[in-house]
Amino acid sequence: MKRQRFPLPTHPLTKFFEPAAESVTTSLGDASVTSYRGTVRLFLTYLGAQYAEVHSLKHLRRDPHILGWLALLRSHNPPLAAITRANYVIYLRRMLEELAWTQQLPALAHLLGRDDVPRKEHHLPRPLTPEQDQLIQRELLRRNDLLTNALLGPRRAGEPAPTGRLRRWLADARRCAAPGTACGSTATPARTLPGTLPSIALHFGVARRQFRATLMRFAVV
C-alpha cells in the first residue's frame, strides 16, 4: 500500500523541484519518495516565507538562501536529530545536482557541499551510579577469580582499570602457554603449575566467560 502524498506548496520553483524529486527517486521506495518530497516542501515553504522575491532557479544563492535554510534546520523547535538534518541536506543537494544537469545551471550543484552535512552525534557512555559500582564490586569480590582480581587491583589503588596492560599481559600468557616456550628472565621451559603464567592462560577462557556473565547479569549500560 502506497503512502499518501501530501501536495507540495504553491511556489514558482515547485515546477522544477517536483520533477527533480521524482527523477532521483525513480528506483527508490515509497519511504524515500516521501522523504524527498518532504524536503522540497520544507525548503520551498522556507523560501516563500523568507525570500518571496525568489521566482527562478537563477536567483538561488548559497548566501543567504541556502545558509539561511541550514540555520533554520539547526534552530528547529523541537530540535532535529543530527541524522534528520543530515538527510534533509543530502536530499536537497541531490535534487540541486539534478536540476544543475537538467536546467543547465552548473552553479546549483555547488550550493551545498559535503561539509554542510551534519556529522553523526557521538555520546559518551553513561557513567555507573555509586550503587551500581558497589554492586559490581561486591560481586567481583565474591567470585575471587583471575580476571576479577586483575580488575579490582587497580581500583583498590585508586587507578582506572588497565585495559591495555591486561590485554598485553593475557597475550603474553597465551604465548607462554605454548609447549616448550621459555618465559621469564631465567628462560626456563614453561611449566603448567598452579599459579604460573601458563596455568593462568589455560584458565583465562573460564574467567572471561564468568566476567561477561557478571556484566550481563546486572545489565549495566
Image: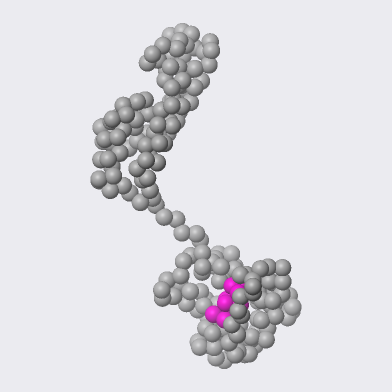
Colouring: one colour
Q: Is residue 61 visible?
A: no
Vertical relation: 219 (above or below) 7: above
Residue at (45%, 55%) from the top-left corner?
122
Q: Main secondary structure of the magenta part?
A: helix
What is the x, y in percent for residue 84? 51, 68
Q: Which part of the image, by quadrant, shows the N terminus?
A: bottom right
Residue at (48%, 74%) from the top-left corner?
73
Horizontal side of 64 relative to 137 (left or right) equals: right
Residue at (31%, 33%) from the top-left corner?
140
Vertical relation: 15 (above or below) 151: below
**Residues rendered magenta in the picture:** 33-42
Q: Is residue 17 visible?
A: yes
Q: Residue furthest front?
A: 1
Vertical relation: 23 (above or below) 130: below
What is the x, y in percent for residue 14? 64, 85
> Considering depth in this image, is 7 or 111 the residue closer to the camera?
7
